[in-house]
Amino acid sequence: MARIRILPHQEICPQGADFEAEPGETIIAAALRNGVAIEHACEMSCACTTCHVVLREGFGSLAPAEEKEEDLLDRAWGLEPTSRLSCQAQVRDTDLVVEIPKYTINLEKERH
């Protein structure tokens, strides 16, 4: 079992969070199960970028992103080399440190 540490985020998780995740569980599933409400406008179907996160530790332990995820990530705010969609990134047995970007591109939330 791996541990996920979510770095503090002003709105979503001001104190940060630390919890366990099952191998094969996605980052967002583990986060939601532990009260960290990462946005997921497409209901975790890999159709938007609202669940974009940046891995500060453990990125190399994740399976490579598939082409669909890579294409979506190109549109994410604050894209970094260790960015992933948390609905697609499955935890293995390595601990992760995750940063939730300050902004997302969520047209539904912004009423566009």
Image (cartoon, helix red, strand yellow):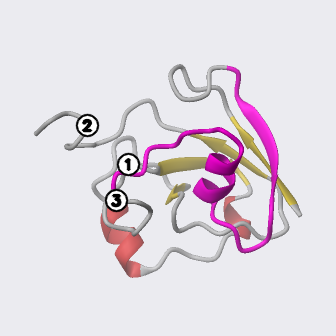
- Asked which secondary structure carries label 3, the reply is loop
- Asked which secondary structure carries label 1, the reply is loop
Query: Residue beneath label 1, please?
Result: 50
Amino acid type at image mark 1: Thr
Of residues 29 and 53, the one drawn nearer to the viewer in this rendering: 29
At horizontal 35% and vertical 54% (from top left) the residue drawn is: 49
Of residues 32 and 67, the one drawn nearer to the viewer in this rendering: 32
Q: Quadrant of residue 43?
A: bottom left
| 36 up-or-down from 69: above or below | above
Give neighbour class at mark 1: few <14, some 14-19, many 20+ (Cα, 10 Å).
Answer: many
| 34 up-or-down from 72: above or below | above
Marks 1 and 2, how far apart at CA: 10 Å
Left or right relative to 42: residue 111: left
| 8 up-or-down from 29: above or below | above
What is the residue that sits farthest to the right in this orientation?
1
Left or right relative to 42: residue 35: right
Q: Quadrant of residue 62?
A: bottom right
Residue contact at pointers 1 and 2, CB within 8 angstroms: yes
At horizontal 25% and vertical 37% (from top left) the residue drawn is: 109
Sequence-first tag of 3 and 1: 3
Amino acid type at image mark 3: Cys
At horizontal 40% and vertical 69% (from top left) the residue drawn is: 45
State which region is magenta: 15-41
Sequence-first tag of 2 and 3: 3
Residue contact at pointers 3 and 1, CB within 8 angstroms: yes
Of residues 58 and 100, the one drawn nearer to the viewer in this rendering: 100
Query: Residue beneath label 3, please?
Result: 42
What is the residue that sits farthest to the bottom in this orientation?
67
